[in-house]
Image (tube, coloured by chain):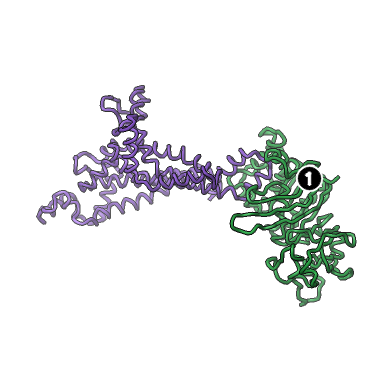
Chain colours: A green, B purple
Amino acid sequence: MALLDVRDLSVVFKRKGTRPFTAVDGVSFSVEPGQTVGLVGESGSGKSVTSLAIMGLLRKRGAEIGGSVTFEDTELLTLSDKQLRDRRGRDLGMVFQDPLSSLNPVITIGLQITEVLERHRGMSRKEARVEAAELLDRVGLPDPQRRIDEYPHQLSGGMRQRVLIAIALACRPKLLIADEPTTALDVTIQAQILSLLSELVSETDTALIMITHDLGIVAGLCDDVNVMYGGRIVERAQRHDLFDRSRHPYTHGLLQSIPRLDAPRGEPLTPIRGSVSDNIEWEQGCAFAPRCPNATDVCWSEPPELKADDGRMLRCHNPVAIGDAVTEGAL
Amino acid sequence: MLRFTVRRLLQAVPTLFVLSILVFAWLRLLPGGPATALLGDKATPERVAAMNEVLGLDDPLYVQYFGFLGRILTGDFGNSLITGDPVMEEVSWAFPATLELSVAAMFLAVLFGIPMGYIAARFRGRFLDNATVVTTLVGVAVPVFFLGFLLKYIFTQEMSLLPPSGRQDVLIDATRVTGIATLDGLLTGEFDATWDAMLHLILPAVALASIPFAVIVRITRASVLDVQGEDFVRTANSKGLTTQIVRKRHVLRNALLPVSTTIGLQTGLLMSGAVLTEKVFAWGGLGTLLEQAIQQRDYPRLQGLILLFATVFVLVNLLVDLSYAIIDPRVRVR
C-alpha cells in the first residue's frame, strides 16, 4: 500500500476581481514507504503548490483545493486544522527553499528544534535539548553544543539548511517533502546537502518527495520522476527510463538545455523556446503547444490525456520518437 | 548586553553636547536678546549694554558657551525671570507630575494598543478590523484638547464620575516623597491620597494616550500582517506547532520590533501632547512651566526645559534601542 496517495489534486486560487487561476490541475501520484519521488518543473509549473497542498499549508481563504490526499489511510484534505497540526512535523516533515527566511530570526536554532520535539515527542525542555544537539550532530553541523544557542544569522547558508533538515527530521517523519532545498545554496554546498538528505532518508527509511527544477538533482536521487507543466503532470517514469529516453518534448527539451561536457566545443545549447507565459489553457489543447517543436494541429485543439506508453505515463499527442534520446551519462 | 548598554550610553554624550550648542545658539540668535527681554522693548541702548555686561554677554561667544556648559554640568540652569527661583528647582518640582501623566498615558496606549492591533490583524477585512481602523483614524485626527474637553464634559459634567482637573483634591494633605502623587500615597500608606490621585489621573491620561494608542494599533496591525506572510511562519506551521505557539513565539515576537520603535518615537511626541493636556486639565507639570516661559520670554527656564525634554528624548531612544537588542539578537552583535 502506498504511503501517500495523491488523487486528482487541484488547486484553484480565487481572488475578487481577478480570473480564477488553476495552479494545480488533476495531479495524481503516489509515494511508497522509503521511496524517493521527484517532482520536476520550471517556476509556475505548480510543483510547490502541490507540496503545500499536501502539507495543508495553503491559506484556506482564496484557495480552493479539490481531489484527495491520502496518507496512511487518512484523508488529509478533510482533517481539521488541529488534527493536521498533530500530524505535521510528526509524520510529515518539510524542508524549504530559502534557509535564511525560513528560520525565525529572533529565536535560537536550539529552540526551533526543541519546540517540535516538545510538541510531538512529549519531551521536556531538557531532554529535547540533548536530542536537538544530537540531531545537529547528525546533520553534520560542527560544534553542535555551541551552535545550539546561536541565532540563524550567525550560521552560513549551508549550516542553516542543515538546521532546517534537522527540524524536519526531528520526529522521524515517514514522509519528507523537500522544496528546492538547494536552490539558494552554493554549488559545492548543494552537493553536500543532497548527499546528506539521501543518506538520512535511506538510513531512516523515510520517503522523500524532491521538488526541483534541476534534472541533475533528480538524476542522482529519485526513483520515480514526475515532470509537471502548467499545473499538470506531463510525463512520469522511472529515473532510468526518463533519462534514457525522455518522450515528452518538454522533458526532452529540459534535458537538451543542460550543458554537456562531452559536446563538441562551440556547439550552442538548445533551449526551449518561449516561456511559461506563452501557455494556452489546457481546456483548449496542450498547454505546451506554443513552445513545442513537435506541435501539430491536434495539439492546439485537443487536450492530451495522461496515458500509459512505453512503460511510463505520458501526456502528449506527438511524443519524441524512441531512439532520439539524451543519455544520463551526459549529466 | 552590558557592553551594548555602555556603548549606547556613551553615544548619547555627543548627542547631548551638540544639543547644548544648539540651545545656546538659539538663545543668541533670537532677536532682541536676553537683555531686551529682561528690560523690555523700550530700554535705552545704554541700559541694554550695561545689562549685557552684567549677564556676561559682552564676552566672546566661546567664553560664554563654556561658561554656560560649565554651569549646566553643575546643575545650574540659572534663575527663572518670572519667579526668580532656580530653574532646576522649578523643574524638579514639576517634572514628576509630567512624568506621571506621560507614563500613565503610554502605559494605557501600549496596554490596549498592542492587543487591539493584533486582534485587528487576525480579523483582517472583517467588521472588527474595519471598526478598529476607523476608531484609530479618529484617534489620530482628533486634537488632544478637544478630546480633553469632551471627556470632561461626559465624565464630569454629565456623569459626575471623575474630577475635572488638578492632580489631587485640595482637601487631601498628602506627604510629598517623589512628587508622583499616585506613588507617594503608596509609599507613605496614605491610600486615600493614591486613590484620589488616580481618579484625577484617568481623564488626562486617556486624552493624552489617544494619539500614541492609535498609532500603536496601526503599526501593530500592519506589522502582524507583514510577519504572518513570512517564510519562517510557514516553517513553524509545517512543524505542526499549536496556533498559540506560532502566534506568540513566531508572529508576535517578530511583529513587536517596529512597534517598539514606534513606542519610543511616540514617547518623545508625548511631551508636546502633555503641554496641551496639562493646560486642559490644569495639571501642574512641565507643560504649565513651558507655557508661562514662552509667553513671558523666560529664557533661562526655556533653556532648561528644552535641554530636559531633549535629554528625556535621548534616554527614551536609548531604552528603545535596548529593548530592540533584547527582542532581536541581530542588533546585539553589530
The front one of B39 and B112 is: B112
Which kind of residue does numbered mark 1 sit on? Answer: Thr
Asked if residue B326 shows in the view, the reply is: no
**B250 left or right of B145 in image:** right
Q: Residue furthest bottom?
A: A266
Where is residue B127 shown, x and y percent of the image?
Answer: 52, 44
The front one of A11 and A1 is: A11
The front one of B37 and B155 is: B155
Where is residue A130 shown, x and y percent of the image?
Answer: 70, 37
**A324 left or right of A213 in image:** right
Residue A309: image quadrant is bottom right
Q: Residue furthest top?
A: B189
Residue at mark 1: A70
Circle 1 marks a residue in which chain?
Answer: A
Where is residue B160 shown, x and y percent of the image?
Answer: 32, 29
**B111 left or right of B32 in image:** right
Asked if residue A294 shows in the view, the reply is: yes
Where is residue B278 shown, x and y percent of the image?
Answer: 30, 39
Label 1 Cα neighbours within 10 Å, binned few <14 / some 14-19 / many ≥20 = some
User: Which residue corresponds to the image point at 81% horizontal and 52% vertical from the top-left?
Assistant: A29
| Above or below: residue A180 compared with residue B92 | below
Q: Secondary structure at mark 1?
A: strand
User: Which residue corresponds to the image point at 19% horizontal and 44% vertical from the top-left?
Assistant: B81
